[in-house]
Every structure is written in structure tokens, then in C-alpha cells.
Amino acid sequence: MAETWDIREGEVALERDPSDAPDAGVVFIGHVRSPWKRREDCPKNIGRAREAGGDAWIELKPAFAPALSGLAVGQPIILMYWMNRARRDLLLQNPRHVDAPRGTFSLRSPNRPNPVALSTVRITSLDPQAGRIGIDAIDCLDGTPVVDIKPWLETVDIPPA
């Protein structure tokens, strides 16, 4: 059953939801476990998630556990996750924190054609056998699918001045 969405003043949506015709397959490698069960309670960004605190971790599917080799507690990683409860049809959005509608690609909103989100988080615990990575914080709902994990590298990930 398709979900219906309200349109705020100034918002523009696609005629057809991109999720109706996928172009490529994405493999979910696991799920985020977070204290956030409802959208209303979930922090809007990773900074607010750190302020709120709470236990968060990544549970990988068993087949992907060997891919954790080389990671270490204290290391920052880039976590990519699929905001599976977000809208996918908005081109212009009217967030409550801005004064006028903006293009989706100028926002960090989860509502986008491909709802891929990313956060740089720090590993707080690591159990490669169980495929579990403790992380310092996360800004998504419990059960959000994980797309990928990459090491954060200062020599690569800091943009030039």
C-alpha cells in the first residue's frame, strides 16, 4: 500500500515516485540499531544525536562480518544508510528551519530520490565475530538498513582549503 504525503506550500514533487522503477540493486549489509523508534523522537542530524546520547550500533548480516577486518575501536568511519521511511518524490522542499522552499540537492533532508544518508561516526566497540560495531551516535530510526561502511581518512576526506 503506497503511503500518501502532505505537500507543504512551495513544495514540488515528481509525477512518479522513483521507488516505483528501480534502476539498480542495492544490497543492504545490515541494520542500524538506535534508541530512536519514532520520527518525532529522532534527532535531525548527527550533531543533535551526539547531544541526545543513547546506545547505537550496527548489526551486519553474518556474511559481511569478515569485512570488518582492519577496523579498530576509536577509528572514525563513514556510515552510509538507506532512509527507507523517507519520501522519494520531492524536488523542492520547504523545511521548517528555512524561510523559503529549496531544492532537494541543497538540503541534507532524508527526502530525496535515493534516500542515502551518511554520517561520520566513531567506533566505540567492535565484535567482528558477531558482526557488531558500536558507534558514538546516529541520527536515524532503529532498523534503518546499512548500505556501506568506509574508513574516514583525514588525507582523503577533508576538502581542500
Image: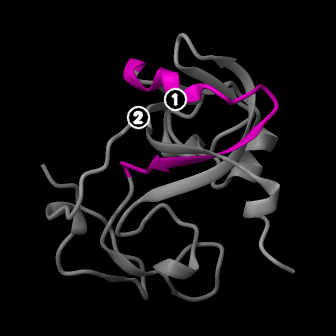
Q: For the point 22% across and 55% down, which residue is it? A: 3
Asked which secondary structure carries label 1, the reply is helix
- Taking 150 as reference, is 84 left or right? left
Name which residue type carries label 2.
Ile
* Residue carrying label 2: 29
The spot of residue 155 in percent (x, y) is 81, 60
Is 6 covered by the magenta stretch? no
Q: For the point 78% across and 36% down, which residue is it? A: 75
* Residue carrying label 1: 67
- Taking 138 as reference, is 38 left or right? left
The spot of residue 90 in percent (x, y) is 36, 75
Asked which secondary structure carries label 2, the reply is loop
Q: Nearer the viewer, mark 2 or mark 1?
A: 1
Taking the view exactly as shown, the residue that stands out farthest to the right is: 161
- Taking 107 as reference, is 126 left or right? right
* Mark 1 Cα shell of 10 Å, populated few (<14), some (14-19), many (≥20): few
The spot of residue 23 in percent (x, y) is 20, 64
Name which residue type carries label 1.
Ala
Point out the image quarter for the C terminus. bottom right
Kindly indicate the quadrant of the structure image that contains residue 61. Answer: top left
Q: For the point 37% across and 49% down, which residue is it? A: 85
